Amino acid sequence: MSVQTETLTDRTAAMTQAAMTQTAARADTAAIKMLARNVKVYYGPKQALKGINLDILENRVLALIGPSGCGKSTFLRCLNRMNDTIENCRVDGTLQLDGEDIYGRMIDTVQLRARVGMVFQKPNPFPKSIYDNIAYGPRIHGMATHRDEMDEVVQKSLERAGLWNEVKDRLKEPGTGLSGGQQQRLCIARAIAVSPEVILMDEPCSALDPIATAHIEELIDELRENFTIVIVTHNMQQAARVSQKTAFFHLGDMVECDDTEEIFTNPRDERTQGYITGRYG
Amino acid sequence: MTDLAQQGSRDMTMAHPKSRYQSAEFSARLRARYAAEQRFRAYGIAAVSLAAVMLVILLGSIVSKGYTAFWQNEIRLTVTLDPAELDPQGTRDPKVLAQGNYMKLIRDALAARFPEVTGRNERRQLADILSNGAPFTLQKMVMADPSLVGKTVPVWFQASDDVDQLEKGYIDRSLPEVQRRVNDLQIKALDSLRQDGSLHAGFNTTLFTAGDSREPEQAGIWGAIVGSFLTLVVTMGLSVPIGIAAAVYMEEFAPKNRWTDLIEVNINNLAAVPSIIYGLLGLAVFLNFFGMPRSAPVVGGVVLALMTLPVIIIAARVALKAVPPSIREAALGIGASPLQTVMHHVLPLAMPGILTGTIIGMARALGETAPLLMIGMIAFIVDIPNSFTSSATVLPVQIFMWSDSPERAFTERTSAAIMVLLGFLIVMNGLAVYLRKKFERRW
C-alpha cells in the first residue's frame, strides 16, 4: 500500500516538475493564476477527463479548443466547481487557485465562485431589471452599502462591458428584453460586477451574430488587463483572435497547450494539426 | 440499336412517372391522411360538445331548482305590543322583555286581522301560515328598540315554508285538500293578505346570515360558510408552508437516491388515497389519541391539510422543475449560496405555478365532504362558529345534510347552497388562472 502511495506521489511530483520546467521554458513570464494537475472527471462510470495538466496564466486569455464532447466545458466547470451541481460527477486530481486547492476541505464554493466568475453559452440574464441583474452579485456580497455606491458599481460594470450607452436610459427595464448580444454583454457585466479574479467563458458567442461576436471579442481583449480569462470556443478564428494561449482537447485529453500563435502555425501534435486545418472535429 | 434505346427510355418513363408524389397511389394515401385528421377532429368536437351539454344540464338543473331559494315570502301583520304582556312593571329590563309572551301578541294580531276565523283548531291552522320563528322576530325587534312597547306597529314576518312553497308554485292548489300541505282556510287567508299587499316575496337574507335550522325558512348557510372559512385557514396555514418547504427541499437540496425515490413514490400515492381514509386517520389520531375537540374546524383543517399536502408538493415540484437550470447556474456562478439561489431566483419564478397548484388544492379542500364526516363535522349546528375549536360544519356537508331533509323547501335551499359553493370554486379557480397569467414570465 505504502509503496503504491509513494509511487503515486513520486509520479505527481515528477509531473509537476515536468510542467514547471515546461513553464520555465516558456517565454511568457506571467504568474500562474490557476493550475491543474492530473485532473480526472467522471460522470458516473464514464470518464470525461483523463488527467489534465494545465497552467492558467494571470492576465492572459486561454482558449480551450477541440471537437464536441472532448471535455473542454467539463474542465472549465471544474475551475469554479460548477460541476458540483451535477449528480454523479466526481473530480480527481489537483486544481489550484493562487496555490490553494479549490477542491480542498477548507475552500468555500460560494467564495470560490465569487473569485472565479462564469459566463455561459446561452445568455441567461435574471428575469429582473437590467439594474438588478448587475446589482444582485454586489448586493449579496455586501460590496456596496449605499444606493450611490451601487449605482456606481452598476454603471462601471456596464461601461466595462460596453453596454452602458445602450441601456443607460432603461435600467429599470427587464434584462430579458435586450437582444441576444446585449444579453450576453449584460451577463459579462454581471460577472465582472462582483470583481472576480478569473472569468470563465463557455462558448460565449455561439448564440450570437457576427457583429455581436465582434463586440464581445473586443471586450474580452480589454478585460484581459484586469482579469484572467479562460474561454471555450468552437470557432478557431476566435481563438486565434482573442487568446494568448491555446489548449487543444481531444477525447478527454489535453493534447497540447502553447502560445496561440505556435498552436496555429506550428502544432506539434498531428491531431492538433488535423483539427485546426479542419480535417476533423 | 436506336429502337432498343428508344424502348429503354420509354420503359424508364413508365417505371418513373412524373414524380413519386404525383402518383395516384400517393394521392389516395394523402386523402386517407386528411380523412383521418377530419375524423380525429370530429371525435374531439363530439367529446367537448358532450361534456358541454352535460355541464349545461347539471348547472341548469341546479339553477332551475335553486334560484327561488333566494326569495322568501313574508307576511305583514299589525301587532299591538301590549305592555301588560311584555313588561307589566314598566322597567324595560331586557331580561323581562326577553320573556314576554310574543306568541300571544301574534295570535291576537291574527285574530284581529281575521275576525271571521273563530274555532280553536282553525286559529291554530291560521297561525301556521307564519314561520314558528315569528315570536323571535318580534322579540328581537322589541329588544332592539324597547320604546316600541305599547305601540301598534306593522311587522313583516317570515311565512312558513309550506306557504312559501305554495307561493312559489311548488304546491298544486288544485289538489284535494287532504293531499295538500296548505289547507283551504290558509289559502283563503293568504289570498286576503295578498289583496291588501300584506304578502310579498323579499330577498332571502336569512339564507346568508343564519346558521342551520330544522325550519327551512330559518335555515341559512352562514354558519357553514364561516366553518368552511375557519377550516380552510387552518388547512392553508399548515399545508402551504410545509408543502412548499418540502417541495423546495426535495427538488433543490435532497440527494437523489433510493430514499428520496421512495419518498417521492409515497407522496404521489398519497395524492391518490381516497379522502375518507384521511378522515379515519383524523378520527383515530386527532380525536381519539390527542383528544382534540369533535366537529372543530381546527381538526377539519388539519385533516384537509394532510389531504392537500401531496397535491401542493407535487404542483410545487413541477413548478420548480420548470425553472430553467440556466437561472440556477447564473446565480451560483456569481457566488450566490444554494439557499440564496432558491430564495431569490428559483422560488419567485416558480411562484405562479405553486400558487395555481395551491389554489386548486384549496378548492379541492373546500369541496371535500367525506373526511369531515368522520371527525364529526356533520353535526346539526345552529350557532355560527366563533373560534377554531367551536363546533362547526362546512358548506359541502351542509349541502349533504339538507339534501337528506324531507321538506320541499330544503330541496331548493340545497340547490342554492350548491350554487354558492360553485360560486366560491369558480372564483378560486378564476383567481388561479388570473395569477398564473399575471405572474407568468418568459426567460
Image (cartoon, rainbow, N blue to C red):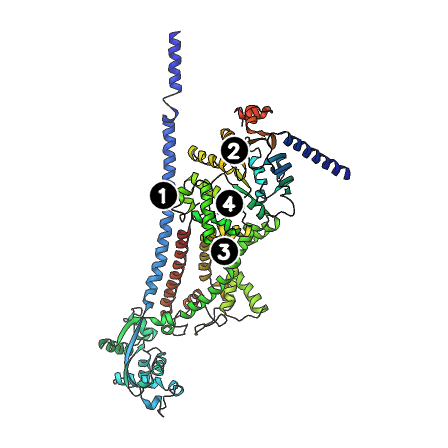
Query: Left or right: B314 with respect to B67?
Result: right
Q: Is residue B114 visible?
A: no
Q: Nearer the viewer, mark 3 or mark 1?
A: 3
Question: Tag on residue B345?
Answer: none
On-image quarter of the N terminus of chain B: top left
| Secondary structure category for the residue under label 4 | helix
Question: Residues under labels 1 and 2: Cα distance?
Answer: 52 Å
Three-letter amino acid code at the position of disc 4: Ala
Query: On the same chain: label 3 and label 1?
Result: yes
User: Do dots 1 and 4 share one subunit?
Assistant: yes
Task: Look at label 2 and name its amino acid.
Answer: Thr
Secondary structure under tag 2 reads: loop
The image quadrant that residue A265 belongs to is top right
Label 4 is found on which chain of the structure?
B
Q: Nearer the viewer, residue A167 or B337?
A: A167
Q: Are marks 4 and 3 on the same chain?
A: yes
Name the foreground residue: B275 vs B316: B316
- Report how far apart the C-alphas of labels 2 and 3 lie in the structure: 43 Å
Quadrant assignment for the C terminus of chain B: top left
As measured in the structure, the alpha-carbon distance from the residue carrying label 3 to the one carrying label 1 is 36 Å
Q: Are marks 2 and 3 in contact (CB under 8 Å)?
A: no
Q: In the rendered image, which residue does mark 2 sit on?
A: A233
| In the image, residue B302 above or below residue B132 | above
Q: Which residue is mark 4?
A: B330
